[in-house]
Image (cartoon, rainbow, N blue to C red):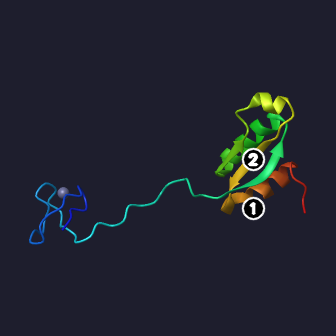
């Protein structure tokens, strides 16, 4: 038996946790996965322009979109002509595209 609160293990003939006073369960629920690691991100937009990046960030932050700019930290690379790529969580990518279309960053299809 296990305490669901403090996760102490007890013999089967115990019913309550001595420390917490809560009912023991025969099995602890599985740990919630809850990590960010296996979320899928897709590329929605890319730009050379630092000004675009700052503007898009402020808009997406306001919309609550989950995103990051790949290559953003290498400002020298962007200055040298490399892209910063806007990566958006897959299930929010369509919404992000619509926002960027409204702002004129992406062409309507
Ligand atoms: Zn306990």
Describe residue 32's horizontal placement relative to residue 57 as left or right: left
Q: Position of residue 1 (x, y in %)?
A: 18, 68
Pointer 1 residue Cβ closer than 8 Å to ligand 1:
no
Q: Nearer the viewer, residue 35 or 60?
A: 35
Describe residue 22's horizontal placement relative to residue 102 as left or right: left
Quarter containing the C terminus? bottom right
Q: Position of residue 25 (x, y in %)?
A: 22, 70
Residue found 25% across the figure and 58% down from its top? 5
Crowding at mark 2 (Cα within 10 Å: few <14, some 14-19, many 20+): many
In the depicted structure, whether residue 70 falls above or below residue 102: above
In the depicted structure, whether residue 61 falls above or below residue 76: below
Q: Position of residue 86 (x, y in %)?
A: 75, 47
Residue found 83% across the figure and 37% down from its top? 82
Task: Classify the position of ligand 1 by quadrant: top left, top right, bottom left or bottom right.
Answer: bottom left
Marker disc for residue 86: 2
**Callout 1 secondary element:** helix
In the depicted structure, whether residue 103 falls above or below residue 55: below
Q: Position of residue 54 (x, y in %)?
A: 75, 36
Residue found 50% across the figure and 54% down from its top? 35
Crowding at mark 1 (Cα within 10 Å: few <14, some 14-19, many 20+): few
**Callout 2 secondary element:** strand
The residue under label 1 is: 94
- Marks 1 and 2, the one that precedes in the sequence: 2
- The quarter of the displayed image where residue 42 is located: bottom right
């Amino acid at each position: 038996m296990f305490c669901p609160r403090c996760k102490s293990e007890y013999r089967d003939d115990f019913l309550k946790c001595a420390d917490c006073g809560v009912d023991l369960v025969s099995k602890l629920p599985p740990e919630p996965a809850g990590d960010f690691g296996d979320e899928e991100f897709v590329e929605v937009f890319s730009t050379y322009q630092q000004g675009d990046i700052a503007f898009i960030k402020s808009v997406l932050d306001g919309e609550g979109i989950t995103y990051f700019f790949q290559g953003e930290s290498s400002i020298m690379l962007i200055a040298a002509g490399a892209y910063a790529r806007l990566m958006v969580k897959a299930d929010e990518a369509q919404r992000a595209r619509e926002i960027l279309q409204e702002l004129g960053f992406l062409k309507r299809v």
